[in-house]
Amino acid sequence: MSTTTLMEIPVESGLKKKADKVLRGLGLDMNSAVRVFLTKVVSTQSIPFALADEPPLYRFTSEEENEILAAAKEARDPKKVSGPFPTADALISHLRKAKA
C-alpha cells in the first residue's frame, strides 16, 4: 500500500489562479497536475520540458520539420541506400559516379 505525503508549495496567488484556470480547461485539478509532473520527472529522470528557449539556430519551421521527417523516411528505404563498400576507394568511386 502506497502512502501519500502532503506538499506545501508557496506560489504567487495570481500564478495559481491562472494555472487553475488552464488546468480546469484541461480537466485537471492542481493536485493531479503536480502528480503528473512529478511522475514525468521520475520516468524521464529530467525536467519534462525545456527550461530555456532554444537558440534560433536549433528552431525549425513546420515546413523544415516536414522536410527533415520526409528525408529521414526516405533514408530508411533500402532501395535508396548504397553500400557497404569494401574500401574507401570504392566509396569515393561510387560518389563520383552518383555526382556525374
Image: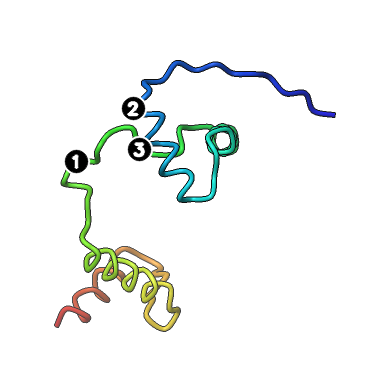
CB of mark 1 within 8 Å of CB of mark 2? no
Determine which residue is flagged by label 1.
55
Residue 10 vertical position relative to residue 49 in the rendered view, above or below: above
Write the residue at 21% across / 81% down.
97
Which residue position is annotated with label 2?
14
* x and y, in percent, of residue 4 in the image: 72, 23
Give the numbered dot on residue 50: 3
Which amino acid lies under the numbered mark 1 shown in the image of this protein? Answer: Pro
Residue 56 placement, left or right of 70: left
Which of these two is toward me, 37 or 29?
29
For the residues labelled 3 and 1, the Cα–Cα distance comes to: 12 Å
- In the picture, residue 52 is in which quadrant? top left
Q: Which is in the foreground here, disc 3 or disc 2?
A: 2
Figure check: 75 above or below 79: above
Label 1 crowd (10 A; few <14 / some 14-19 / many >=20) = few
Residue 79, how many percent across, how many down? 42, 83
Q: Nearer the viewer, residue 69 or 52?
A: 52
**Percent coordinates x, y for residue 80 in the rendering:** 37, 80
SS class, disc 3: loop
User: What's the colour scheme?
Assistant: rainbow
